[in-house]
Image: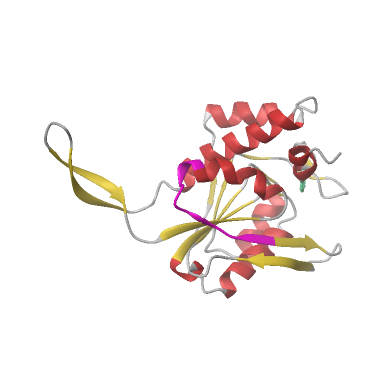
Amino acid sequence: MAGLHLIEHPLIQHKISLLRDKNTGSKEFRELVSETAMLICYEATRDLPLKEVEIETPVAVAKTKIISGRKLAFVPVLRAGLGMIEGVTKLVPAAKIGHIGVFAKDNEHNTEKYYCKLPDDVSERDVIIIDPMLATGKTAVSAINEVKTFGVKHIKFMCIIASPQGIAAIEKAHPDVDIYCGVMDQGLNENNYIIPGFGDAGDRIFGTK
Ligand code: URA
């Protein structure tokens, strides 16, 4: 059984407060999404396995550790997930990147996938699916379904703000998937926006409104 990891680090909480402010413009919003993603990713990668190696320093031979084992892939959910890529790849530059486009079709549980391109070797990688907002959870559940069809065994979901409904939806459909987020908000409004949230993440990242 996986679980929810709320990352309550002061830097993350401070940056989320700046993201929430409706007066934060697109440039700063983009930078904050990227920085917050990097900080949450630090926790989401805490369990990466290490192996001991010997490295020659200018002074002596050091027994030291490097990351070993399965490699990582990040999969942003289009389009807002793209805003988190710069931050997470700063931490894990060797990770490959896939993309998934999914939208919620109606008020039921129907979603439609309109794009999916994953690395050829994705089944040998651990995958972290990224989206700044986990709202109803429909698109997240659908993105996880899609990644699983490629034979991926280890999947994590990373977001900045989650709703209780979104967390419950992932936990019900995919109890094996760990969720990493900065804060859980109170719920959703009638348009399925997170309350208080920070509005439409895609529009604020790309300046489309
Ligand atoms: N997607 C967003 O960008 N914002 C929300 O509040 C919910 C979903």
Q: Is residue 99 magenta?
A: yes
Nearest the eye: 151 or 16: 151
Number of labelled discs?
A: 0
Q: How is the image coloured?
A: secondary structure
- Looking at the rendering, which quadrant does residue 184 occupy? top right
Residue 117, horizontal then vertical, whole percent: 63, 66
For the point 54% across and 65% down, the residue is: 119
Q: In the rendered structure, which segment of residues is drawn in magenta? A: 90-100
Figure check: 20 above or below 107: above
For the point 59% across and 67% down, the residue is: 147
For the point 75% across and 26% down, the residue is: 24
For residue 70, side relative to residue 120 (left or right): left
For the point 52% across and 74% down, the residue is: 151
- Looking at the rendering, which quadrant does residue 140 occupy? bottom right
Visible residue check, residue 164: yes
Figure check: 157 above or below 120: above
Nearest the eye: 80 or 22: 80
Residue 186, horizontal then vertical, whole percent: 73, 41
Residue 86, horizontal then vertical, whole percent: 58, 42
- Looking at the rendering, which quadrant does residue 185 occupy? top right
Q: Is residue 50 magenta?
A: no
Q: Quadrant of the C terminus?
A: top right
Nearest the eye: 93 or 183: 93
Residue that lies at the very extreme toward the front in this rendered image: 58
For residue 114, side relative to residue 56 (left or right): right
Residue 83, horizontal then vertical, whole percent: 66, 43
Figure check: 172 above or below 80: below
